């Protein structure tokens, strides 16, 4: 219940001030969202994917803290030009490294970014009506985390928030 | 991780103006208060007030006079009723736990409100561990305690009621006089504590008029030094110490008295009370300018707490939708405006401020809440600057948010 000091890295501050690939993409192949306003933490990814399954362009929108904005922004940079299968493999730890480290209480921002990205990828294959062999049926830890965060915020806000 | 703090600070270079509005969480101490403290570190009254030599007697005289003066500001009968402690947290723990434990043979119930500061809210959990039953009185949408419910909750087993005089987050001035009357009518034995940290030096306080038995006063909320506070305990009210050790002049708090901090607290009180009416009207005018300026300029903004004379003269608290609070504190910081937020963002538990949820704010409304307090030192120029950068900050963050239009 304590407030922890948040000595953000200069990279996080830089991305907070000048985020890359910000904004909605009207002609996105697929998009997905994770988190919710009730969580205080929400990310939307928009992906433009070529026919041979390469992420040509990625953009994001974010409602959340500086770490949320920075991790979303760096994720779009990290997956640009990647094959979908390789984008799937991007881990939240790599994202955290790329932003110069995350304070412990902000690890979930990196996890949420991966959760949102994987949702978008699943959505892509769902739309396409196929499932590549490398894509597991079982949802990953990061996707589960996003779900749990959304559920928890919903339950708590029903219990104690808003009259 | 710590190297980066330096870079964070450097990112602020070249800002046009700095306006510190985070008086809730700490304050800069005006130089005249610092100067009032300095002689007491090494030149005057540096002795221990309980010892029999000149520096000791000087210290005794100093702390007695300071107690008398503080007693006078709140209309207390005697300086014996003032106990200096190291902070609001300590005073509130002493008031709650020390009073309930000292009166436990009379009953095992304690009543607080839903919007108390954490030093009351959390110390009530200590009492639960000791077997007390703690009830929380709900508040309405503006933060006013429900007096009917208060009356219903209090019974013969209630030993203590603690409801703050002014809410620290939303500035609600609670009807404490009425609450005391109701409480004592239901059970004349009940002791009544009020945390007046956000009221002292901002609205007139008279313990006899209010009818309370204990009051917490705080130094840094009136621009005094941190690390010093006072708990008024009416003569005859039973309270026991939480800590044991060498007792000095402070009946309820052992240890060596910190005279320089007491003098800083005293000077801060003097300055707050010297021109109380003038100070209050200055703060009220700035408060309303800040509040109305933001509400008129920025859409999707909601005022938290009441208006006009039911609100503390210094408090502004506004929720911004589509805009998360922690981000907004950073964005404003980069423009030299320092504020705080009731967002859950620095906690991992996803729960925003309990005050926000108690007044019925939804989570997303609470996450976007910003708390600001003005002082007699703020100027119209300061506010002009704040009102210039605020809409820009909100607009930039709002533009990033996916919460407005939804995704395709």
Image (cartoon, rainbow, N blue to C red):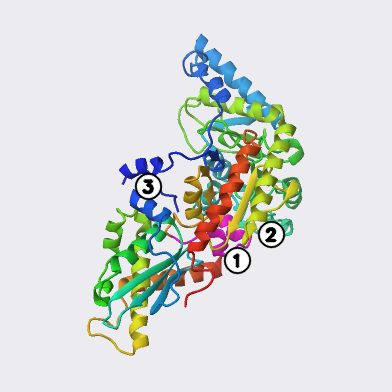
Q: Read off the chain for label 1.
A: A
Instruction: Tell if the residue under mark 1 belongs to the same chain as the one under mark 3.
Output: yes
Please name the residue that numbered disc 1 is placed on. A162
Q: Position of residue A67 (x, y in %)?
A: 39, 57
Q: Can residue B46 be seen in this snapshot?
A: yes
Q: Is residue A152 above or below residue B221?
A: below
Q: Position of residue B279 (x, y in %)?
A: 70, 33
* Label 1 with label 3: CB-CB less than 8 Å: no
Image mark for residue A7: 3
Q: Nearer the viewer, mark 2 or mark 3?
A: 3
Q: Kindly give the residue lying farthest to the top in the view shown.
A: B54
Q: Quadrant of residue B348?
A: bottom left
Q: Position of residue B309 (x, y in %)?
A: 75, 46
Mark 2 secondary-structure assignment: loop
The residues colored magenta run B349-367
Q: Position of residue A15 (x, y in %)?
A: 38, 55
Q: Residue shown at 27%/57% (left/top)?
A: A97
Q: Residue shown at 31%/72% (left/top)?
A: A141
- Quadrant containing the N terminus of chain A is bottom left
* Label 2 with label 3: CB-CB less than 8 Å: no
């Amino acid at each position: 219940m304590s407030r922890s000091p948040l000595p953000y890295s200069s990279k996080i501050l830089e991305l907070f001030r000048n985020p890359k690939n910000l904004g909605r993409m009207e002609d996105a192949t697929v998009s997905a969202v994770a988190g919710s306003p009730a969580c205080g933490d929400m990310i939307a990814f928009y992906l433009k994917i070529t026919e041979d399954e390469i992420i040509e362009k990625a953009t994001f929108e974010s409602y959340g803290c500086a770490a949320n904005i920075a991790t979303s922004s760096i994720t779009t940079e990290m997956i640009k030009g990647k094959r979908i299968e390789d984008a799937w493999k991007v881990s939240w730890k790599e994202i955290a490294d790329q932003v110069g480290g995350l304070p412990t209480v902000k690890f979930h921002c990196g996890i949420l970014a991966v959760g949102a990205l994987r949702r978008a990828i699943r959505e892509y294959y769902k739309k396409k009506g196929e499932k590549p062999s490398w894509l597991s049926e079982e949802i990953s830890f990061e996707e589960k985390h996003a779900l749990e965060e959304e559920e928890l915020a919903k339950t708590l806000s029903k219990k104690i928030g808003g009259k | 991780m710590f190297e980066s703090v330096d870079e964070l600070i450097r990112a602020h270079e070249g800002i046009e103006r700095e306006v510190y509005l985070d008086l809730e969480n700490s304050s800069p101490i005006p130089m005249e208060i610092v100067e009032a403290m300095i002689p007491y570190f090494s030149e005057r009254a540096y002795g221990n007030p309980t010892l029999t030599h000149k520096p000791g007697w000087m210290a005794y005289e100093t702390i007695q006079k300071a107690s008398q003066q503080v007693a006078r500001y709140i209309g207390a009968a005697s300086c014996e009723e003032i106990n200096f402690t190291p902070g609001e947290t300590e005073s509130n723990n002493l008031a709650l736990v020390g009073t309930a434990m000292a009166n436990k043979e009379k009953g095992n119930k304690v009543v607080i409100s839903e919007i108390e500061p954490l030093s009351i809210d959390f110390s009530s959990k200590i009492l639960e561990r000791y077997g007390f039953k703690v009830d929380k009185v709900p508040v309405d949408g503006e933060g006013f305690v429900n007096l009917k419910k208060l009356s219903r909750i209090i019974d013969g087993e209630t030993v203590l009621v603690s409801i703050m005089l002014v809410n620290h987050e939303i500035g609600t001035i609670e009807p404490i006089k009425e609450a005391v009357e109701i409480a004592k009518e239901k059970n004349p034995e009940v002791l009544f504590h009020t945390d007046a940290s956000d009221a002292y030096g901002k609205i007139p306080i008279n313990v006899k008029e209010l009818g309370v038995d204990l009051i917490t006063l705080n130094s840094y909320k009136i621009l005094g030094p941190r690390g010093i506070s006072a708990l008024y305990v009416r003569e005859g009210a039973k309270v026991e110490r939480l800590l044991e050790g060498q007792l000095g002049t402070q009946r309820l708090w052992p240890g060596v008295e910190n005279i320089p901090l007491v003098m800083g607290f005293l000077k801060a009180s003097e300055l707050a009370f010297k021109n109380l009416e003038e100070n209050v009207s200055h703060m009220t005018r700035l408060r309303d300018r800040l509040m109305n300026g933001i509400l008129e300029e920025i859409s999707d903004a909601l005022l938290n707490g009441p208006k006009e004379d039911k609100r503390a003269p210094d408090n502004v608290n506004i929720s911004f939708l589509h805009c998360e609070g922690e981000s907004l504190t950073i964005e404003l910081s980069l423009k030299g405006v320092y504020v705080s937020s009731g967002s859950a963002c620095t906690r991992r538990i996803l729960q925003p401020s309990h005050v926000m949820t108690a007044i019925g704010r939804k989570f997303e409304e609470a996450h976007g809440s910003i708390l600001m307090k003005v002082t007699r030192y703020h100027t119209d120029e300061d506010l002009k600057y704040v009102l210039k950068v605020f809409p820009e900050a909100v607009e930039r963050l709002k533009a990033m948010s996916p919460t407005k239009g939804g995704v395709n």
